Image (cartoon, rainbow, N blue to C red):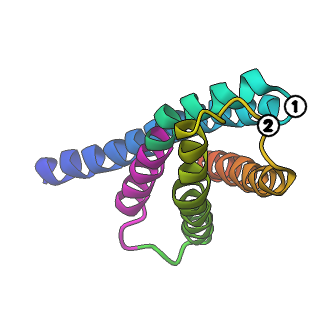
């Protein structure tokens, strides 16, 4: 019986650890790239810095999403119909879709510009609008995960 209790606690605390670590890593990387992107709207220097920085932040954001998701799967095992679990699942799906756009549309665009030594030129307005919308989705999504995570502890 004691072994069962210990294993459940490890599962619970392990899940919490993964979720917290995922939030820290993902939200930290998102904050860095979002600030760079915001500054890069009107600055050639920050546009170039954003292109360089996203090479580091992109994998960290994916790592954060993965860690949070695995932790949530363990934490909510058997109770996936819980409202907070469902809300977090929807948010994670939205963040994944947003990440796919950033990884497979924005990132190749930035890397192509870098390859042709155009990475210090300001982005076209159409790309700035798309990236701004993506920033809003990302900001709301990650902070919603933080708030919903805190709600699971209450």
Question: Which region of the structure is painted magenta?
Answer: 60-78
Q: Position of residue 103 (x, y in %)?
A: 52, 54
Earlier residue among tags 1 and 2: 1
Spatial CA distance of label 1 from label 2 is: 7 Å
* Mark 1 and mark 2 residues within 8 Å of each other at the beta carbon: yes
Residue drawn where x is 56% and y is 49% of the image = 107
Judging depth in this view, the residue of 40 and 118 nearest the camera is 118
Q: Is residue 68 magenta?
A: yes
Residue 42, labelled with which disc? 1
Residue 98, labelled with which disc? none
Residue drawn where x is 35% and y is 42% of the image = 13
Q: Position of residue 78 (x, y in %)?
A: 37, 73
Q: Is residue 104 magenta?
A: no
Name the quarter where the N terminus is drawn.
Answer: bottom left
Q: Which structural element holds mark 1? A: loop
Q: Tag 1: Cα neighbours inside 10 Å, few (<14), some, or many (≥20)?
A: few
Residue 122, labelled with which disc? 2
Q: Nearer the viewer, mark 1 or mark 2?
A: 2
Judging depth in this view, the residue of 15 and 110 nearest the camera is 110
Residue 85, by quadrant, is: bottom right
Q: Is 117 positioned to the left or the right of 5 in the image?
A: right
Q: Tag 2: Cα neighbours inside 10 Å, few (<14), some, or many (≥20)?
A: some
């Amino acid at each position: 019986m004691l072994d069962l209790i210990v294993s459940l606690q490890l599962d619970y605390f392990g899940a919490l650890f993964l979720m917290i670590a995922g939030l820290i890593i993902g939200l930290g990387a998102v904050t860095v790239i979002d600030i760079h992107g915001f500054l890069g709207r009107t600055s050639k220097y920050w546009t170039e810095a954003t292109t360089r920085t996203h090479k580091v932040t992109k994998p960290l954001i994916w790592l954060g999403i993965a860690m949070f998701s695995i932790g949530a799967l363990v934490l909510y095992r058997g109770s996936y119909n819980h409202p907070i679990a469902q809300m977090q699942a929807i948010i994670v799906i939205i963040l994944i879709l947003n990440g796919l756009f950033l990884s497979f549309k924005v990132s190749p665009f930035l890397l192509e510009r870098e390859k042709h030594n155009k990475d210090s030129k300001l982005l076209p307005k159409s790309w700035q609008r798309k990236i701004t919308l993506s920033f809003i989705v990302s900001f709301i999504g990650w902070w919603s995960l933080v708030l919903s995570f805190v709600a699971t502890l209450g």
